[in-house]
């Protein structure tokens, strides 16, 4: 396997979901509830950290919730980088759904859950956040950190739902299409690269060092400057 690219030509964002929690296993909505990593989650973060460290990250920002903080600090131990904490990277506020399983919610709030699950922008849990709000705050947190910076490989230790909303926002996808972005497994990551085309999703739900994408330019339009 080839090592990750050494030379950065533009900013790159690595969206890293936290490791497993007991509520993940129980299929409970966590949202803003501060549930810690379980033993498996600690192992997952420790297993993923050397792979992300091998990508030579330049900075780490993280949600203020403990499951994301613990995941980020597994990388700190290997890189010596400091973690910048930003509450805007929290998981979706799931309102009345927090602490409940999907089956429990279907018994009391089926219509709202169905609309939300199919990509609606209705408030999660009736009084929680909309997808658009989560995407906007996550995008703002990353944009504020990257402002006036270049050649950054930024690790964002965050949450599954927040990662999906950030990806949808960066790719300018209509909100109903965000639900078509597959989920992130615990301690896996997705990578956004900035390019002349805009932001590209180049890795999703990955758990290994990225390989170069050979042949990507085969059908590309050749810029005037190199003709």
Image: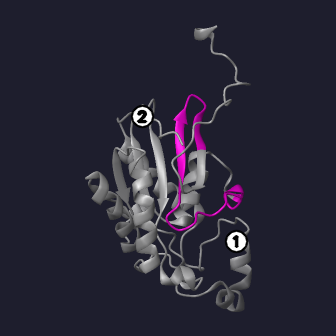
> In the picture provided, is 151 more to the left or to the right than 124?
left
Q: Position of residue 1 (x, y in %)?
A: 54, 43
Question: How many C-alpha atoms fall within 10 Å of the one at disc 1: few (<14), some, or many (≥20)?
Answer: some
Quarter of the image with the C terminus is top right
> In the picture provided, is 73 more to the left or to the right than 17?
left
Q: Circle 2 is placed at which residue position?
A: 6
Image height check: is 223 above or below 60?
above
Task: Check residue 197 for magenta coloring.
Answer: yes
**Residue 222: which numbered mark, if any?**
none
Name the residue nearer the viewer: 6 or 112: 6
Residue 141 seen by the camera:
no
Image height check: is 134 above or below 5?
below
Q: Going 66% across and 84% down the picture, which residue do you hit?
A: 102
Q: Going 35% across and 53% down the picture, which residue do you hit?
A: 60
Which coloring applies here?
Answer: one colour
Question: How many C-alpha atoms fall within 10 Å of the one at disc 2: few (<14), some, or many (≥20)?
Answer: few
Q: Position of residue 203 (x, y in %)?
A: 59, 48
Which type of secondary structure does the marked residue at label 2 adopt?
A: loop
Name the residue nearer the viewer: 183 or 47: 47
Which type of secondary structure does the marked residue at label 1 adopt?
A: helix
* Discs 1/2, front: 2
Sequence order check, earlier mark of 1 and 2: 2
Image height check: is 219 above or below 168?
above
Q: Which residues are magenta?
A: 176-201
Q: Circle 1 is placed at which residue position?
A: 117
Image height check: is 150 above or below 61?
above
Q: Quadrant of residue 62?
A: bottom left
Task: Check residue 216 for magenta coloring.
Answer: no
Q: Going 36% across and 55% down the picture, which residue do you hit?
A: 61
Q: Position of residue 3 (x, y in %)?
A: 47, 40
Residue 205 seen by the camera:
yes
């Amino acid at each position: 396997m080839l090592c990750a690219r050494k030379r950065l030509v533009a900013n790159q964002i690595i969206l890293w979901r936290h490791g497993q929690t007991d509520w993940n296993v129980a299929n409970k909505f966590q949202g803003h509830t501060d549930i810690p990593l379980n033993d498996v989650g600690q192992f997952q973060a420790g297993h993923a950290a050397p792979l992300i460290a091998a990508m030579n990250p330049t900075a780490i920002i993280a949600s203020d919730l403990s499951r994301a903080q613990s995941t980020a600090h597994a990388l700190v131990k290997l890189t010596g980088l400091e973690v910048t904490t930003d509450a805007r990277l929290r998981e979706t506020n799931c309102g009345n759904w927090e602490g409940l399983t999907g089956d429990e919610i279907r018994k009391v709030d089926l219509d709202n859950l169905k609309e939300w699950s199919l990509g609606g922008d209705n408030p999660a849990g009736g009084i929680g956040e909309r997808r658009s709000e989560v995407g906007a705050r996550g995008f703002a947190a990353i944009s504020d950190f990257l402002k006036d910076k270049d050649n950054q490989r930024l690790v964002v230790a965050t949450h599954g739902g927040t990662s999906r909303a950030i990806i949808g926002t960066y790719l300018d996808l209509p909100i109903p299409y965000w639900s078509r972005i597959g989920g992130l497994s615990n301690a896996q990551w997705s990578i956004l690269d900035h390019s002349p085309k805009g932001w590209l999703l180049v890795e999703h739900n990955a758990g290994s060092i990225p390989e170069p994408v050979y042949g990507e330019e085969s059908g590309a339009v050749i810029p005037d400057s190199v003709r």
